[in-house]
Amino acid sequence: MRRRTVTAGSLEEILQVTAPAPAPAAPAAPSAGAPARREEHALRTEFEFELPRGYVDEAGTLHRHGSMRLATARDELRPQIDLRVKENPAYLSVVLLSQVITRLGTVTDVHAGVVERMYATDVAFLQDFYRRVNSEGHTRAAVTCPHCEGGFEVDLSGGRLGES
């Protein structure tokens, strides 16, 4: 099991990755022999996470690490016409999460049946993670130490509460 710690260096790296790109300068004419450089996108569209409990597949394998992509308008609209959601509105989050989770351990075909078999703790974690990623654009949260009342940020994408 691999644990990640959040340090000041990695937090600054995250802030640099999620910062808006600077305005481009006047484009220079490429030289005849130089290959064209691919422009890097500053927008982060996929976020790694670690489930609190983990998903156990049919073979009994535990999957805790995964990734979720940003939701599109289509992702938000598609569950509205799903018959399962019309019969039971609470099923909306199952359908929505199944569309935006791109990987869960070695499982790459994450469908509603996979999300249905997850523990409630993990589904609640993923719902909050979805909200943070799609509303706030990052997975960091500001917290306050209950003992010293010092404020700091933690990355919710990995590790469990209390771990360092």
Image: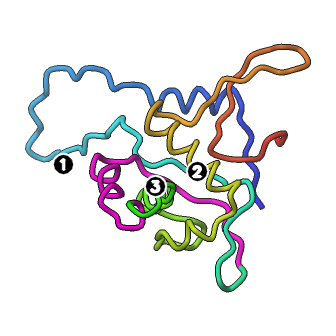
Asked if residue 94 is positioned above or below residue 30 in the image, the reply reads below
The verdict on residue 90 being magenta is no
Residue 35, numbered circle:
1
Residue 84, quarter of the rendered image: bottom left
Magenta residues, start to end:
61-85
- Please, what secondary structure does the residue beneath circle 3 have? helix
Residue 89, numbered circle:
3
Q: Which comes before the other along the chain, label 3 or label 2? A: 3
Tell me where residue 98 appears, x and y as whole percent.
Answer: 46, 62
Real-space Cα separation, disc 3 to disc 2, in angstroms: 18 Å
- Please, what secondary structure does the residue beneath circle 1 have? loop
- Please, what secondary structure does the residue beneath circle 2 have? helix
Label 1 sits on what residue type?
Pro
Tell me where residue 119 appears, x and y as whole percent.
Answer: 69, 62
Label 1 crowd (10 A; few <14 / some 14-19 / many >=20): few
Asked if residue 23 is positioned above or below residue 71 in the image, the reply reads above
